[in-house]
Image (tube, rainbow, N blue to C red):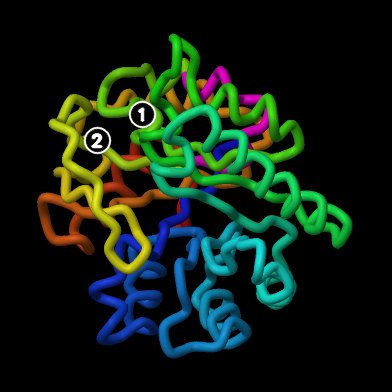
Amino acid sequence: MLKPISVQLYSLREEAKNDFVGVLKKVADIGYKGVEPAGFWDLEPAEFKKIVEDLGMEIYSAHSPWARPDSLDVAMEQANILDLKTIVCGYGANDFVDMDAIKRTAETTNKMQEVLAKNGFTLFQHNHDFEFARIDGKLKYETYFELCPEVKVQMDCFWSTNFGAEDAVEMLKKFSDRTILMHIKDGLLKQKKQEQKLKDGILDRKIELRALGTGELDIKSLIEAMPEQVSTVTVELDYCNIDMFEAIEISYKYMTENGFLAGNK
């Protein structure tokens, strides 16, 4: 049975500034089965949920709420409103810069995981590229998860290549036991790594990304290697070389017409 296709709404953040409800309607019209919010703009979480469901879509996962040590109560409250039992966390490059940083980050994560687990939530982590760099030949993420045995993974398969240094399929297989969600973007794998800058708390790379099926990521093999417990595969394009709505529609058609994922159309 095919897994449902979702879209990370961060991809459409510029369009959402003017008409977030209109964005949701266009996503539903394309055929996406689900959305993953990254902020609610001018909507309350309950209002957002109702609009999504009235449009025939689901919320399989969310990047709002986001787990932080000082805001877990709010994160759990919002997750309950969205009827989610999963809550996301993630970090910046400095949190994985060396072994001491990895240990500190793991300690923070474990403390959050313990609180969330006691309240019935599963903590999962979203990656970028820097977790897949290596120290003395060993993946930073591998070391980190040895210190965080209970945390699950939302595997961003494009970033897991660390700009072509690693194989995305092998990375998915390596962390398959704990992967419950997947993000897929596409582009050229061996782009020059830009200096990372923080813009509104978000890593800003400005590299070229492309609609799914028009880049170099081996998407077919990733779908074939997808762990059974993955609930949805989410399209996310931080940026794109073409109009974002066009890219989101091309990506939907590529994933559904090739029989990789199930949509509503």
Q: Residues within 10 Å of mark 2 (few under 14, many from 20)?
A: some
Q: Is residue 19 magenta?
A: no
Residue at image coords 11%, 54%: 242
- Callout 1: few (<14), some (14-19), or many (20+) C-alpha neighbours within 10 Å? many
Give the residue type at disc 1. Ile
**Residue 41's spot in the image, x, y percent?**
41, 83
Instruction: Give amino acid for label 2.
Output: Gly
Which quadrant of the figure contains the N terminus? Answer: top right
Q: Choose between 186 and 146: the one closer to the eye.
A: 146
Cα–Cα span, label 2 and label 1: 7 Å
The residue sitting at the top extreme is: 137
Image coords of residue 93 (percent x, y): 39, 42
Residue at the spot of label 2: 213
| Residue farthest along the right direction in this orientation | 118
Residue 250 drawn at (x, y percent): 23, 50
The residue at 17%/31% (across/down) is: 188
Q: Are marks 2 and 1 in contact (CB under 8 Å)?
A: yes
Q: Where in the figure is residue 18, as x and y percent of width and height?
A: 25, 86
Per the rendering, the mark at residue 21 is none
- Mark positioned earlier in the residue sequence (2 or 1): 2
Q: Is residue 178 above or below residue 68?
A: above
The residue wearing badge 1 is 219
Say what secondary structure mark 1 lies in: helix
User: Which quarter of the image is occupied by the C terminus?
Assistant: bottom left
- Name which quarter of the figure residue 86 lies in: bottom right
Residue displayed at 52% across by 75% down: 52
Answer with the quarter of the image where residue 229 lies.
Answer: top right
**Element on which disc 2 rests:** loop
Residue 177 lies within the magenta run: yes
Front-lying residue, 119 or 249: 119
Say left or right for 139 vs 60: left
Q: Which residues are magenta?
A: 171-182
